[in-house]
Image: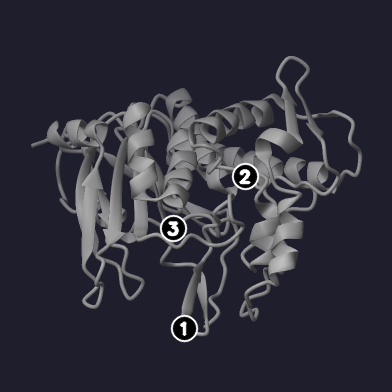
Amino acid sequence: MPKIKLKWLDLKVVALGLCVGLLVACSPGGEQEILRLAGQTMGTSYRVVAIDSPSPAEELQAAIERSLDEVNGRFSNWDPESEVSILNEADSLQAISVSQEFVRLMQIANRVHQRSLGYFDVTLGPLIDLWGFGPSTDSGELEMLVPDPHLILETMQHVGQDRLLVLDEESSTIQKLNSEVSINLSAIAKGHAVDRLGDVLAEFGVKNSMIEIGGDLAARGHNQHERPWQIAIERPDAAGASVQKIVPLSDLAMATSGDYRNYFEQDQVRYSHIIDPQTGHPITHRTASVTVLAETAARADAWATALLALGRDRGLPIAEQHKLAVFFIDRARSNENLEFEVTASSAFRAIDAQDS
């Protein structure tokens, strides 16, 4: 059964945005003024909650919209005039100049790629397209079929972040070593946009805020009750939205990636949008959802995707090695009643215990 794909959200799951909104608004009253702003971006919604903002709402929202337009103008694969689209369309194997913002995002992407054993890969675009989850195949109720195995192997020749892309930080250039390679930053740019909005709010003097874009979020300072923000992790059940866990966040970002919203079925086999870069096929392990807490939303965003591709068994040792705060939700081995198993890294348990 094919599923409708959402722009920018093909690589991520919306992590119970409704519940996030309810949590920050659940208690009326209080002495602190609460400013709530919302809008549309990246094929999804954004929401900003600011406590005791010293700036007018109209000025703040205008600055937010400008910042989001700039992020889209650089990193959207659905905008043919964006910086990443122009780079992807270039046939040249010569180094191409990119913005400093592009360089900074690729620096994060390269670090996560190396530390995740290559499971975070921004060149997966051709495989994502081949399986029917990318911008070039985005046409609503598109019929999605399992690709021919030979075509998968051929497409994998154009995938490989570490061997097909050369980032020169000093000259701010990127060189493609294969003219067919393309870059898709959907699994990190949404988190980066959250970070950008955090900088905007700081420039306007906002010290306590919660920013959310399509499930990726950052919480700074405290909520209206002068406590850490209380943020929900969604139970990975495609049939409905419910809460698996509440996490206290202060001066931290959170991103969740799951395999249960965007998929198709063929011959009673379920094919997720999360592609294993080693096989060229969708993941097959039992991990349904991964939540990462980090200093920046871009880093949380990238690691959530990488660790979901890896799965809990391979991902948890990497999370412990790099002291990552990670919460895995796995389907139980006999999942007839939609039962789940949860596993938290040491760093996640330490953060979770702070509000107990």
Q: Which amino acid does label 1 sit on?
A: Gln
The crowd level at tag 1 (other Cα within 10 Å; few <14, some 14-19, many 20+) is: few
Q: Quadrant of residue 275 in the image?
A: bottom right
Whether residue 81 appears in this view of the structure is yes
Question: Where is the C terminus found, in terms of image quarters?
Answer: top left
Q: Position of residue 74 (x, y in %)?
A: 70, 40
Q: Which amino acid does label 3 sit on?
A: Val
The crowd level at tag 2 (other Cα within 10 Å; few <14, some 14-19, many 20+) is: many
Question: As displayed, is residue 17 above or below residue 207?
Answer: below
- Residue hosting label 1: 268
Q: Residue 13, which numbered label?
A: 3
- Residue hosting label 2: 185
Q: Position of residue 267 (x, y in %)?
A: 52, 85
Q: How many marks?
A: 3
* 2 vs 1, front mark: 1
Residue for point 69% across, 65% down: 130
Which residue is nearer to you in this view: 236 or 278?
Answer: 278
Pick out the residue farthest to the top.
170
